Image (cartoon, helix red, strand yellow):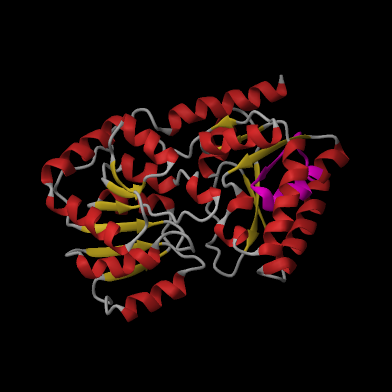
Amino acid sequence: MIRICNSLHHDGYVITLIGVKQHSSSPLLHKSYHQIRINTYFKKGFGFYAEYNTRLFFKLLFLKADLFCCIDLDTILPVYFAGKWRNKKIVYDAHEYFSQLKEVVTRKYVYKVWHAIEKIFIPKFKNGYTVGYCIATEFKRLYEINYEVIMNAPILLENNLPEMLSRDKIILYQGAVNHARGLEYLIPAMTQIDASLYIYGDGNFLKETQQLIIEYKLEQKVILKGKSDPESLKLITKSAYIGINLVENTGLNQYYSLANKFFDYIHAGVPQVSMNFPEYKKINEQFEVALLIDELSVNAVSIAVNTLLSNVDLYESLQSNCLKAREIYKWQNEEKKLILFYKNIFE
């Protein structure tokens, strides 16, 4: 969202980014665009969604704007109704295939609710974009809408060349410490890997991750580093030896994923272990930047990581390919599509 808001601001748009204030929210950093946080009494569950959507709806009713953009399905209702009430343009930004999240598809009632909202309201958003071709194709098949694909690739810094093979052999997991991210396989796999694992992030699987570290007696080997701001994380990623991007195949959101960290590792010149899912496979066939595993298991993870640790020739080849891939998969290219998308809406 920082990249999107900055790009639109620099193209002359007045941007207001609205989010929710949680107990764990870091202080807002100064940005060139407006930022609003909505405080809620309820912090999770149905009460949270009902309260936040209601507060957001009334905020949008009185906010000066020409267009409302909702990020994922959990804000689609207030954006749609406020947009229609005020006769404003509306856009859907699908960062996730929300109804296919693991925490949704594995809960029968929750899935019915979100799937119904998706079926009713996504077709009403004729203008939209998403992060990968698989989700765009699925939306086209189901709802006969043509969404642009704007990938979450980082900004390429031309003088930010990573040092080759000069790093300590640190394995890095960065991003949300959530369910369906393979941590229940990664942690026990570390018993078979002669290196340290640093985990940067927070999420709904953090307590279970802490328990796994204790269970497998890995307190000195697997280090929970907590959340880090984006700029600090760039430097941290550059210092890693191997990146980890594991995704459980439960729900199409995971299977169709194209995680931010996949691109972050590429830009840092860090070979990674990732999943043999369609979006990753497509990029890896163009530029081999990762070892892709067919199944999420302790054995598969440990074999892949140990291969990168021991095979210097393979490691150097993947690292070299990262430098080629980041020239293509960079925000400078995706930004052009974003600017054109909004230009076409306002013409």
Where residue 126 sits in the image (x, y, percent)? 72, 31
Q: Nearer the viewer, residue 239 or 309?
A: 309
Q: What stretch is highlighted in magenta?
A: 62-80
| Side of 45 relative to 316 (left or right) | right
Image position of 28 with respect to 279: above or below: below
Residue at 59% of width from left, 46% of height from top?
Answer: 97
Image position of 322 with respect to 217: above or below: above
Image quarter hosting the C terminus: top right
Residue at 30% of width from left, 70% of height from top?
Answer: 188
Residue furthest to the top in view is 347
| Side of 185 relative to 251 (left or right) | left
Where residue 90 sits in the image (x, y, percent)? 74, 36
Image position of 191 with respect to 111: above or below: below
Taking the magenta stretch, the answer to whether it contains residue 78 is yes
Res 4 → quadrant: top right
Where residue 49 sits in the image (x, y, percent)? 72, 62
